């Protein structure tokens, strides 16, 4: 099973998207969101709050 090149989630067969760079590197994305962030924003997953929110729930919101 392929894994998303951005968020490392497994991509179910028939879903997701494959992207080939000019230099021949292959990328797989589980969603358009991952594609956008990986290709256009060029950000690392560690910096993305929408990813860390899923795995870590912090209690006590500060305003
Ligand atoms: Zn993804």
Image (cartoon, helix red, strand yellow):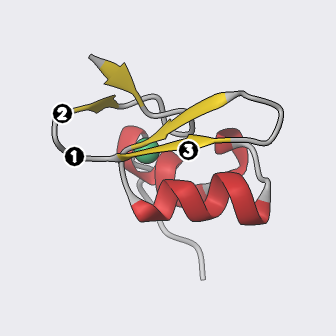
Circle 3 or circle 1, nearest the eye: 3
Q: Percent position (x, y) of residue 33? A: 47, 64
Q: Residue at x 74, y 43 (%)?
A: 44
Residue at 74% across / 65% down in the picture? 40
> What is the spatial separation of the Cα atoms under label 3 and label 1, in whole angstroms?
13 Å
Residue 41 lies, in percent from the top left, at: 76, 64
Toward the top, the furthest residue is: 1
Q: Residues within 10 Å of mark 3 (few under 14, many from 20)?
A: some
Q: Quadrant of residue 22?
A: top right
Mark 2 vs mark 3: which is more N-terminal? 2
Looking at the picture, how far across and down is residue 46, in whole percent?
Answer: 68, 40
Q: Which residue, given by chain and number where applicable, does mark 2 sit on?
A: 12
Q: Nearer the viewer, residue 5 or 58?
A: 5
Is the N terminus in the top left, top right, bottom left or bottom right quadrant?
A: top left
Mark 3 highlights which residue? 19
Outermost residue toward the bottom? 63
Q: Is ligand 1 within 8 Å of the beta carbon of the residue shown at mark 1?
A: no
Residue at position x 37%, y 56% from top? 31
- Residue 16 in the image, given as x and y percentages of width and height: 32, 47
Crowding at dot 1, Cα within 10 Å, few <14 / some 14-19 / many 20+, comes out as: few
Question: Which element carries disc 2, helix, strand or loop?
Answer: loop
Q: Are marks 2 and 1 in contact (CB under 8 Å)?
A: yes
When the figure is inspected, residue 58 is found, relative to residue 37, above or below; the finding is above
**62 above or below 11?**
below
Mark 1 lies on a secondary structure that is: loop
Q: Nearer the viewer, residue 21 or 46?
A: 21
User: In the structure shown, which secondary structural element does the residue marked by tag 3 occupy?
Assistant: strand
Q: Is residue 26 above or below residue 21?
A: above
Nearest-to-viewer mark from 2 and 3: 3
């Amino acid at each position: 099973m392929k894994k998303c090149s951005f968020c490392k989630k497994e991509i179910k067969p028939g879903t997701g998207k494959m992207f080939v760079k000019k230099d021949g590197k292959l990328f797989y994305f589980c969603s358009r969101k991952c594609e956008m962030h990986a290709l256009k924003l060029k950000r690392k997953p560690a910096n993305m709050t929408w990813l860390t929110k899923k795995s870590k729930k912090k209690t006590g919101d500060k305003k």
